[in-house]
Amino acid sequence: MNYLTHFYLNQANPDSEFHFGVALPDLLSVYNRQLRFQSDKARFFAAQSGRPALWDGIQNHLSVDRDFHISPIFKELQAEVHSELMRRIPKVPYRLFFVAHILIEITFDHLLLARNPNLAQNFYSHLEQVPRRGILSELESFFESPIAGLEKHLDRFMEIRFLQGYRESDQLLVPINRMLQRTGQPMTGQEDGKQILETIQNKKTVIQSGLDQWITK
């Protein structure tokens, strides 16, 4: 799942360091796709760490993502959205199953933000409360190597606040193209982009139903 859906599921938790931990797997994936938390190692490291809330958040993210991606809710949504994309864009240079995956997760964030206009601001407000230098030291210990440039990456993430743009459905192509580019796939052209946005509109009710099932289960 994406940033805002993770945050929505945990918003009752008042601990900002926990929320930073929940966001970290996605933040690291954007910075360097090779930096991935392994559940067993994270659990072992958490037991020795002086930042239990941070590691609780990281493990929460890993657990929720794992459960969601094997759930019938996600599998049915992905199959339906993929089928619609195949009908609309039969010949493409990118993986439509991947596009369906990220389309669902970004649309979840979009729908939650439409219902909760302050959701993105509250998310960023929690992250602002956490001193990032201590987090970087913790991560370098975990990955056993320096992580040059991550602090600037996190500063940029906080400065741009692109999640606030998820409120408008016509802006959702921006993060989809960002994900395609990051995974070595070409960005969508004008016509394919139009078809993807129309797929979001046509499947929004179905995706909304899946979202409601997931957040109330």
Image (spheres, helix red, strand yellow):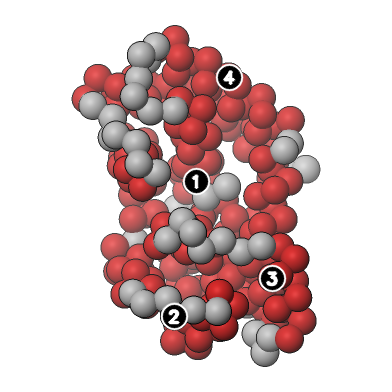
The residue nearer to you, when weighing 75 against 128, is 75
Where 81 sits versus 154, above or below?
Answer: above
Alpha-carbon distance for marks 4 and 3? 34 Å
Q: Which amino acid is tagged 1?
A: Asp
The residue nearer to you, when weighing 4 against 89, is 89
Instruction: Report x, y in % for residue 2.
Output: 52, 50
Q: Which amino acid is tagged 3?
A: Ala
Q: Nearer the viewer, mark 3 or mark 1?
A: 3
What element does badge 1 sit on?
A: helix
Instruction: Report x, y in % for residue 35.
Output: 51, 63
- The earlier-in-sequence mark between 2 and 1 is 1
Tell me the tag on residue 66: none
Q: Nearer the viewer, mark 4 or mark 3?
A: 3
Instruction: Report x, y in % for residue 114.
Output: 46, 44
Q: Which residue is mark 4?
A: 80
Q: Nearer the viewer, mark 4 or mark 2?
A: 2
Local packing at callout 3 (Cα closer than 10 Å; few below 14, some 14-19, many 20+) is some
Local packing at callout 4 (Cα closer than 10 Å; few below 14, some 14-19, many 20+) is some
Where 146 sits versus 118, above or below?
Answer: below
Q: Nearer the viewer, mark 1 or mark 4?
A: 4
Q: Which residue is mark 3?
A: 42
Q: Nearer the viewer, mark 2 or mark 3?
A: 2
Q: Quadrant of residue 162?
A: bottom left
Residue shown at 44% from the left, 10% from the top: 87
Residue shown at 69% from the left, 52% from the top: 64
Q: Which residue is mark 2?
A: 146
Local packing at callout 2 (Cα closer than 10 Å; few below 14, some 14-19, many 20+) is few
Alpha-carbon distance for marks 4 and 2? 42 Å
Alpha-carbon distance for marks 2 and 3? 18 Å
Q: Can residue 151 be seen in this snapshot?
A: yes
- The earlier-in-sequence mark between 4 and 3 is 3
